[in-house]
Image: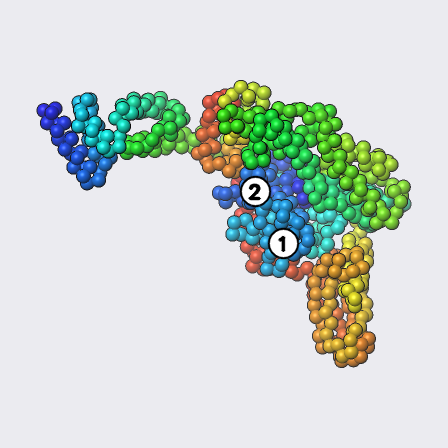
Amino acid sequence: MATIGIDLGTTNSVVASVVGGTPVVIKSKEGYNLTPSVFAITSKGRKLAGHLAKRQAILNPERTIWGIKRLMGKRFDSPECKLLREKYPYKIVPDENGFAAVQIGDRIYSPQEISAFILVELKRVAEEYFGEEVKKAIVTVPAHFNDNQRQATKEAAQLAGLELLKIINEPTASALAYGFRWAKEKKIVAVYDLGGGTFDISILQIGEGIYEVLATSGDTFLGGDDFDARIVDLLAEHLRKETGVDIYSDPMGLQRLKDAAEKAKIELSTREETVVNLPFISSTGKEPVHLIRSIKRAELEAITYDLVEKTIGICYKTIQDAGINIDDITDVLLVGGMTRMPLIRRKVEQFFGKPPVRGVHPEEAVAIGAAIEADALEKRSGEVLLIDVTPISLGIAVKGGVFHKIIERNTKIPVKKVEKFTTSRDNQDKVIIMVFQGESSRAEQNELLGEFILSGIRPAPAGVPEIEVEFEVDHNGVVNVSARDVVTGVAQSISVHQHVSLDEKRRKFAEEELKEFEISLKERW
Amino acid sequence: MVTEKIKSLLQEGLDLYGYGKIEEAIEKWKEVLELDPGNLLAMDYLHSAGIDVDKLFEKEEKKEDIENLLKKGRTLEAYEMIIREERNSLYKMCLFELVRYRLDKEFRERYLKGKVVPQKVVSERELIRKALTPADAFIVSQIDGKLTVEDLIDITDMNEFELCMSLLRLEREGIIKV
């Protein structure tokens, strides 16, 4: 049975596999390499995912879910979620555990359920290609994803009926695709990933199967869609000046304009000039309105220059965070369709002082890398490509709100570590153990994964009781934390991502709904 | 004899009108005008019932056109004609339903049976010379030789009838083929 690698992107997703020894992206029957990460329910109750869902997004804004990756594993009251509630036209609500969810009609969907619909669509693409069921997969996530976000992604894969071999980081997968595997000498690789909706820059140290993320940063609201929006604004302004028509108040016209803007942007990566031709795009009420306008590459570069500069600024800061000099970087990899834009390639080469590595289609790199690792795992060839590490440091809050790391990031897993703590007040009979994930020295600036209370501590002066806190991360990256009073033996524990997962009832309902969706796709195609 | 018939029809109309059966009363008085086109009483009664007698005769001619169009299988034209009219008689309401039923049947056969994929047959440049509404142009912009009619219904958020109407118009204009 075939294995697949899936790049589950914010804007677009890709599925790949190793076929006849060569990793390839699997095209859908309709001929597409990319599948939009969009899910919708039409006014008639029909569920759509991928291209069809994207095409009706502007006409059906409140029932079309896009960019769901930004909400994966996020709490409703987080600052990021607050920002998204202002930006997204669809309804974002809290679930019963306080995590962000979306509402379509009366139904509330968790982000992992929405992602599962997109994964079912990708699964369909793979099954049509292979002519048989496909189950085993690797799914990728951004390097900065915390435990809740990773757990939500795992759950999405399980809901979609996939047997998840592993979750791997996107820059790591890209490096695999570009051929960076076991290396005798350590290499420092910069992965510049500009996709449809987000920008990520990661600095990796690669050597002997370990892909250490030295630093990672980005902008979750900077991507190809913003470049499209600049072209839409340009064309809309042209239309307004020529005819007085406000295309923003015309959903059908705006949808056509958006599609044309994306097409023009792509064409200008290989041509110096393109023509946008949209007959009958609107009407003044008395006569039809046509839009015909040429756009030169130089004009596109002028109206998007600031966006590219912003990515370079983030690269500069990330290199500083990694504690290295720019000359230490041995290779630069480009990932994401937007990196085909000549301006971006020029600026990246200029900044890093070396041309990016070629040889892989940038929009395919992540999925290809995931497929390579999936194939190696399944064949158990003995060729270990990746050694798993914890991506982000784990620890607890101690006195004064300080974050005390117990497991440092990039520690090989599985791992178990025990540290001893004590009480801060006389006769303190309980302690609250708050588990955080992050790199800040202040606990409240990191992500709270969970908390529990250890009661029944032997009364004693402050500093006398011995409380052992054990952190365990298993081979799947599942984090378990326990605490024990050494003298009395009283203990308590927590599996920290319990609350982001769906409960039994919701899970069953979601699985049934996804099964029906899968059947409807098979009947349709 | 005709005079007796006319008297009887006039009275029957009055009786029906008195019972609130306006439509039936109108039909009786119209029958009078068919027998005796200038009958003042019938015209007066019809006027009281809110009927413009002059327009009545105009529309009577168009009614035949619609029926002829239906007989010739030009259902779309018949529909385009009848939707512009007031459906202020039982006959017209029935005719409208008949035209719509025939059109609906034609749509199901032509567009909604199996996986029908429309294809564009003109370029963007040629499109400007046609007569389209923005909604029609939007549908044309979505036709890529891969989407089925069902898919188009989903992504345009139009109901089946509206979309099929557009498709039939676009076929008639030579912009698409199925």
Q: A352 or A187, which lies in front?
A: A352
Chain of the residue displaying label 2: A
Same subunit: marks 2 and 1: yes
- Residue A61's tag is 2
Residue type at tag 1: Ala
In the rendered image, which quarter is residue A148 located in?
bottom right
Residue type at tag 2: Pro
Q: A298 or A209, which lies in front?
A: A298
Chain of the residue displaying label 1: A
What distance separates the C-alpha of mark 2 from that of mark 1?
A: 19 Å
Place of residue A501 in the rendered image (x, y in percent of width and height, measured from the top left): 64, 57
Classify B33 as above or below A410: above
Q: Callout 2: helix, strand or loop?
A: helix
* Residue on which disc 1 sits: A100
Instruction: Judge the density around disc 2: few (<14), some (14-19), many (≥20) Cα neighbours within 10 Å.
Output: some
Q: Callout 1: helix, strand or loop?
A: strand
* Residue drawn at point x = 69 percent, y = 35 percent: A227
Instruction: Judge the density around disc 1: few (<14), some (14-19), many (≥20) Cα neighbours within 10 Å.
Output: many
Classify A47 as above or below B144: below
